[in-house]
Image: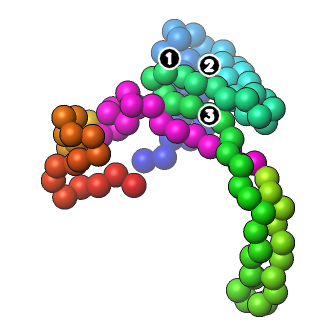
């Protein structure tokens, strides 16, 4: 299920015990501040959620398939999000995925996380 921005704003307002416009402003402030920090090349770490930052992508040549032309793409930075362990555990629990904590990287059952 995809949650719309309006629904998300309402859920934040309910969690804060306030009205929807205040929830909307809280969401807007967090999103804008995250974007500003990441755009400046810094990293934001929220321990229960994850790490927002950038990674460098090297220069490369790409081919446009339908035209067959080659174009050079300069080196640049792209946004990156790395989920924190608590978020990963919560998602696994919600989806019924099994994960053996005792052996790093070993999953039980046939389900895999992408």
For marks 3 and 1, give the CA distance. 26 Å
Q: Is residue 109 above or below residue 53?
A: below
For marks 2 and 1, give the CA distance. 8 Å
**Looking at the image, which is closer to me, 13 or 46?**
46
Task: Where is residue 58? Give x, y as percent.
Answer: 74, 58
Task: Where is residue 96? Give x, y as percent.
Answer: 22, 43
Furthest residue in direction top, as rendered: 17
Q: Nearer the viewer, mark 3 or mark 2?
A: 3
Q: Secondary structure at mark 2?
A: helix
**Disc 3 or 1, which lies upstream in sequence?**
1
What range is drawn magenta here? 77-92
**Disc 3 or 2, which lies upstream in sequence?**
2
**Looking at the image, which is closer to me, 16 or 113?**
113
Q: Secondary structure at mark 1?
A: helix
For this view, does 42 lie left or right of residue 17? right
Instruction: Give the residue number, with chain letter if any, for mark 2.
Output: 23
Q: Quadrant of the C terminus?
A: bottom left
The reply to whether the C-beta atoms of the residues labelled 2 and 1 are less than 8 Å apart is yes
Task: Where is residue 44? Give x, y as percent.
Answer: 64, 26
The mark found on residue 14 in the picture is: 1
Residue 35 appears in view: no
**Looking at the image, which is closer to me, 23 or 112?**
112
For this view, does 94 lie left or right of residue 1? left
Instruction: Give the residue number, with chain letter if any, for mark 3.
Output: 52
């Amino acid at each position: 299920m995809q949650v719309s921005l309006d629904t998300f704003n309402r859920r934040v307002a309910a969690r804060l015990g306030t009205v929807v416009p205040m929830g909307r402003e809280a969401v807007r402030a967090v999103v804008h501040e995250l974007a500003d920090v990441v755009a400046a090349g810094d990293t934001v770490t929220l321990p229960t959620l994850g790490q927002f930052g950038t990674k460098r992508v090297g220069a490369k040549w790409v081919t446009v398939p339908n035209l067959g032309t080659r174009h050079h793409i300069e080196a640049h930075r792209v946004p990156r999000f790395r989920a924190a362990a608590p978020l990963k555990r919560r998602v696994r629990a919600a989806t019924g995925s099994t994960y053996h904590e005792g052996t790093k990287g070993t999953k039980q059952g046939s389900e895999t996380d992408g």
